[in-house]
Amino acid sequence: MDRNPPRRDMRRVYDHDEGNGYTADQQSLRLRRFPSQMSNQNYPQFAWGSNPADEEPSGGLPQDLRSSPLPMALKRAVRQVQEMQLPVVSERDSWKRKRTKYLRNLKDNAREFIYIFALWNKSLQKIGGNFGGGVQSYFFFLRFLVVLNFVSFSLIAAFVFIPSIVFRSVGDSGVNITVQESFLPPSTGPQDCLQYDPNPVGLGLFYNYFLDVLSGTGFLEYSYLFYGYYSNTEMDDSFSYNIPLAYLLTVVFYFIFCFICIMARMGIAARVAVATGGSTVGNYSKIVFTSWDYGCLGDRATKLKQKNIHYRLQVDLEEENIKKRKASLTLTQKVMLYSLRVLMFLITSGLIAAAGYGIFEATNFSQGRSEQEGVLGLIFEYLPSIVITTANFLVPLLCDQIALIERYSPSLTVILALLRAVVLRLVSLSVLIFTLWGQITCDGNKNHGDCLLCGYNHDLYPCWETRVGQEMYKLTLFDLLINIAMLFLVEFPRRMVVDNWSNKLAQKVGRQEFVVSSNVLELVYSQTVVWTGALFCPLLPFINTIKFVILFYTKKLTLFQNCRPALKTFRSTASTFFFLVVLLFGGGLATAVMVYSLAVIHPSYGCGPFRFFPSMWSVVPASFSNLSKTTQEFLFFIGSQAFSIPLFVLICVVMCYFVALASVYGKSVALLKKQLKQEGRDKQFLVRQIEELSRKLQIPTHAAGVRD
Amino acid sequence: MGTTASQLGKDLLSEYQELTFLTKQEILLAQKRFTELLTKDEKNLPNTRVPMERILTLPELKSNPFRKRICHVFSTSEQKDGSLTFEDFLDLLSAFSDSATLEIKSHYAFRIFDFDDDGTLDYGDLEKLVNCLTGETDDTRLTTEEMRQLIGNILEESDIDKDGTVNLSEFQHVISRSPDFVSSFKIVL
């Protein structure tokens, strides 16, 4: 690059008229470049002559100063100049300026206030500094879920839990069960449907208490934990509070609230993902310019980050070389590779299907043996959870080995592995729920033997909602126990072995790595289980909050004590969006379960707030008739076609507007890029002209010099 | 105007809050850490300039491969020795703070990476940059062949006007497509 030195001199000459090598804040047209007498050319210039009256009185002045890359002394001087130059502005303008300044101060103070209360900030900072952004994003996600669960539990507590406690303590004085005649069970043997006796036997032994806590039966079964305990009372004397309606609407709003929170968080992540365009061009520049983490603390973390970057660069360069070589594969090789991939896809689908079948069998077996006592009974109770956890552990391992044969590019392999794990988890949960449904509703056949009497299988499930709630409770609890057990039985010993035993095998296996993706999938799975069980076990979000808090501290402990930082990092922003999408899938499954239970299955006659309604949802039309006439007419109008069709058309128009706006922005970005290229070419052309001219001017003087 | 060693007046504090992206807590914490670096005599002088070696003992900067460049970029000293006053230190923290804008971060990142201070990133700058990123020891450096391939790729991707160097706008264009930059260009005390 030996044409650089003369060009640089030329550029210095060329740029001297513009005054500097750096341009000031380019967004603002107000900050015009100003030829300066400053000796230090490294400071960007500030337009001393700019008139504040030209600017829109939007309070942009202080904001501008903060984002201008000047040293403090200069910023102060500029501010003084601006304040002196302030012309007499109208009262309205000065009021506007004061207001924006006040609002900005308020926003700053609010941010400071929230920052003090944000949970676990110091820990997250420490984790990010030592292990990088990928691991930190897992803990951010965990914190988000803790807050979400806690806030949504407070919703349920306020509207369902506390009123129930109040009404029970007040007693049966104000109880008024309003029920229509047709809702009562059929006269042929109604007593069978109403029979529900959850009272525990053998309360004496502590051992039984322990088993009951673990399986949600016994003394826990008829408690606030499960659906069966809530009554269908409506207080009528001083004020009316309709518990069934409150229960139903609270659960529905809980779902909507969680959905809104996740969408809000996704919006932020999506905006960022769209802005980067998703293109893979610019990969090297991105790594070199943006990959250094300035929050890295300590020599060890720094060296590790450097090794990490080195590894990434080498891998990318090698992949580029491989790709060049791969483009020259022969046809037979290509056909073989593709057929191999199809075969592997079939094998992985088969593995997932086999896992699903295993769970189906285990659930049937466990439900059939529900009367077993003691430890064996406990194992039978937990059999579905055990099978699910084993499947979720084994199948991804096998899929990893299969991925080695498939030979996709590294990024595609990671995405495929994640997708397979997600599908596996959701399939296992759906199979469990499907099996339960099959047993409760006799495979959907309302007129089949056992279900003929009450609409559901009242022999096996006198209170089927509590049963479903118990299954979800067991899944949650088992997950937590397994995590703690793994910590003490697997991770700590592994570290002991690796640190103290200098065997070749031990060194090869090495300390554990904190794999972000599988941990995040665990969280998503737990949250889906909680959502599915929320209708049947109202205290489940609270239990989940405690579980996630315990999880935070145990994961942090294992991270700092047992894990070594990963060599291959995990891109934090794109993956955050992916995690939230997966969470939404889980939420969708839970919503489907809830909607089906609300609308189709007959609630139990023997327990719960919806005792005598044909379906849980029918409490809403029943209470609807209690509303005033005008409210009813208003609600009917909103549901009618005269309102919803214009609303729909309006939403379509708004969407079209945004799509058009997006396409216009895209086009202007492309145009600006072209303009930039054009300017570069113009600059090169002018530089060459200058070189030619200076050469022409030099030759006569040189000749003159030689002659002399 | 300088800082007295012990207390920051309320006016000064609010001025700093207006001119930087730091919150009041962060400014006070910065003052505490800065005064820890001063010797006993220096504590009584206003507007002391702390030499670079002492700044580099801060744990947040100690192992950063760009520490010397950071000090040089934010220093306002005439001798170009990388020494910082308290206000330079606040400027540093403001650019690296949580709420600083993408523009100011990318601007300062560009100046940090411009090892020869000529206003553009050319082959030499990029080579020094990559060596800082991968580590200076022999076994962590890229080979010459790999370096050439890498810098060739970088220039091909980011040099839009094809002049063989990356200027500020091209640099900011690359940065704007990388969402992790704002969160990784952060130093919090």
Image (cartoon, helix red, strand yellow):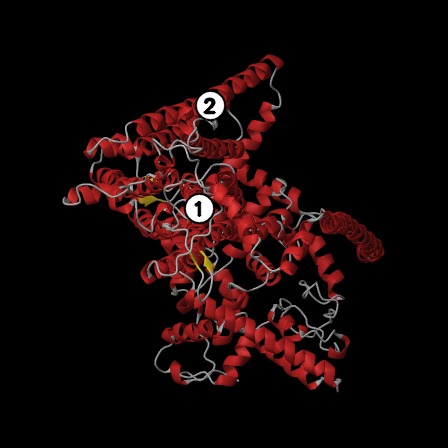
Secondary structure at badge 2 equals helix
- Tell me residue A27's x, y (percent): 70, 63
Using the rendered image of the protein, determine whether residue B85 is visible from the camera's viewpoint. no
Question: Which residue type does callout 1 highlight?
Answer: Phe
Using the rendered image of the protein, determine whether residue A303 is visible from the camera's viewpoint. yes
Question: Which residue type does callout 2 highlight?
Answer: Thr
Q: Is the residue marked by circle 2 packed among few (<14), some (14-19), or many (20+) residues within 10 Å?
A: some
Residue drawn at x 51%, y 49% is A252
Which part of the image, by quadrant, shows the C terminus of chain A?
bottom right
- Tell me residue A631's x, y (percent): 63, 59
Q: Is residue A592 left or right of residue A146?
A: right
Q: Is the residue marked by circle 1 packed among few (<14), some (14-19), or many (20+) residues within 10 Å?
A: many
Q: Residue furthest left?
A: A205
Pointer 2 chain: A
Q: Nearer the viewer, mark 1 or mark 2?
A: 1
- Tell me residue A495's x, y (percent): 25, 41
Q: Which mark is residue A610?
A: 1
First in sequence: mark 1 vs mark 2: 2
- Image quarter of residue B103: bottom right
Pointer 1 chain: A
Q: Is residue A617 left or right of residue A22?
A: left
**CA separation, marks 1 and 2?**
43 Å
Which part of the image, by quadrant, shows the N terminus of chain A?
top right
Residue drawn at x 43%, y 63% is A118
A700 w.r.t. A44: above or below: above
Which residue, given by chain and number where applicable, does mark 2 sit on? A348
Secondary structure at badge 1 equals loop
Q: Nearer the viewer, residue A133 or A433?
A: A433
Q: Are marks 1 and 2 in contact (CB under 8 Å)?
A: no
The answer to whether tags 1 and 2 share a subunit is yes
